[in-house]
Image (cartoon, rainbow, N blue to C red):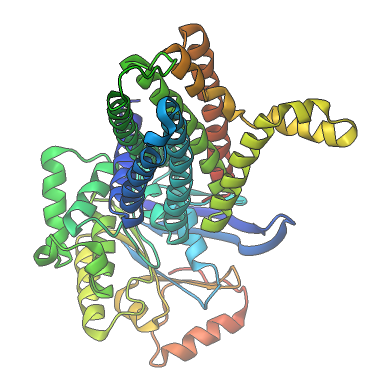
Amino acid sequence: MKVAISTSRLGKTFYHGWGNSASFSLDGISLEIPAGETTGIFGGNGSGKTTLVKLICGLIRPTAGSVLIFGKAPAQAVARDAIGFLPEKPDFPPYLTVEKTLRFLGQMSGLRASRLNDRVGYCMEAVDLGQQSGKRVQTLSKGSLQRLGIAQALVHDPQILLLDEPTDGLDPLARHRVKGVLQNLKAEGKTLLLCSHYLSEMEEFCGNALILHEGKTVYWGKPAFEPDLEKWFLRNLKKGGEVETRD
Amino acid sequence: MTDTFRRIWLVSRDSLSSALHNRWFSLSLGALLLFVLFGRLLSGQSYGSSGPKLFFDLGQTLIRVFSGVVLILLLAHQFHSFVEKRISHVFLVRRLSRMEFILGKGLGVWIAVSSVVVAADVFHWLLLHGQIAGLPEGFDTGTTLPGALGWLQLMVLKLVVLMIITGMGLFLAGLSGSFLFTALAALLVWSGSLLVGEAHSMVDAAEGSGGYVLGLIRFLLPQFQTWNMSSLIWHEGLVSAKALWPAGIAGLGYTALFTGLAVFVFQRRDL
């Protein structure tokens, strides 16, 4: 089994203001996410989901433990090329068009000439934005912006995709379209790491589930599919730190 | 190395594009040209032969002050929007390092404002020469008018000052993503440096702890008056290379120092 992402006793403490008052965001997270699988990260607001994703991306540095992407530190170019990231509220320079945004970010990832053209074209089609390629970012709807967010994460053809709340705040039609994109990515064999509030999405997409509560792992393993997902989620939260292992 | 320069250039191009799409920036360019024109009207015929000198001083001061203010506001706005809206994350998750991002942003804003300075200087030069040509014969300005090289030196010195302010702005933006903090702190430090530089006799005469503090401020802050050689250029037409080179090197040193501090702060704060 090839491991795409591994974390060992990962922790992050934030220091606020000049007085340096500390608050723990993550504490002792150890995971091994196999390549090609879809993993869901769930938890309430402030549970540390976004912090974990940012640590994996290398956007912030851990205060304890380590992260490896295919055995490399996130700061290394090889690891960066392997990761595509959709932030929680994706935003882009408003004056660029959809196509120019993808082209610009593709160039930033080191793509050149014909490969860049191919990838930009492919990504726009993959997220159904081909018709809006000439539209400026500032005129896009929230659903289209979210799909552009997925497209920019895909533009350099990464093996791992970290998607922070990909369907949050979208109307049913936009959610349906984004879910379609996710299904296709899963079928392509990408390693997906999905942060979401929606438990139904976990049932739909994820082979593994990580439940975080106040920065600690309360569940890590195959999601136990029960008719009442909410009860299952709350039961795992109440266990408080008792980590289950995967089958 | 080539890839690093390429990424810096990509970010600076985007930063430049962002400035050009900023309506306030476009308006400020128009406003600066208008101010220079007002300077010309103010120093009209009634001042006689001292009119051109008045217009030269007024125009150069306006360009210098206005471009500094526009640069600070533009830099504060760009960093505020990129840091607060987390637009920087879709950049930084790629191969781009924080250092490349900061250098690119700074370079883009500097190029945008420098182009305004060049345009305003050319406009000022045209109006000034028009004013001198319009003087009745027999009027002696009593000066050596700066030639093309003199104007070029004036421009270069202003661009060096803008470079230092850019570095300073980047460092202050790293301390807080807030637009207001960056803008106010940079304006305060800049104007403070100018005041301390102007009041050197007072600083030298000050005694006790007050004198120590003023001396320390003068030591820490760049003395922007060092790069203001317009009076010398007006009277002598040119500044010697002997005076110009140290000013240029000092400017580069201050820029490198502030930018280095900015990169350090951005990395430490995971911005």
Location of residue A197 (image quadrant): bottom left
Front in this rendered view, residue A196 or B228? B228
Location of residue A36 (image quadrant): bottom left
Camera sees residue A139 = yes
Q: Residue sitting at 54 percent across and 81 percent down?
A: A236
Location of residue A175 (image quadrant): bottom left
Front in this rendered view, residue B188 or B76? B188
Residue A92 % position (x, y):
31, 58
Say if B151 sits above or below B113 in the image.
above
Q: Residue sitting at 44 percent across and 33 percent down?
A: B47
Q: Residue sitting at 83 percent across and 27 percent down?
A: B205
Say if B38 sits above or below A214 in the image.
above
B188 displayed left or right of B10: right
Residue A214 % position (x, y):
61, 72
Say if A31 sits above or below B168 in the image.
below
Identity of the residue furthest to the right in this view: B208
Residue A190 % position (x, y):
27, 58
B41 displayed left or right of B240: left
Q: Which quadrant: the C terminus of chain A? A: bottom left
User: How many discs appear?
Assistant: 0
Say if A226 sits above or below A139 in the image.
below
Residue A139 % position (x, y):
22, 69
Camera sees residue B178 = no
Q: Residue sitting at 59 percent across and 68 percent down?
A: A215
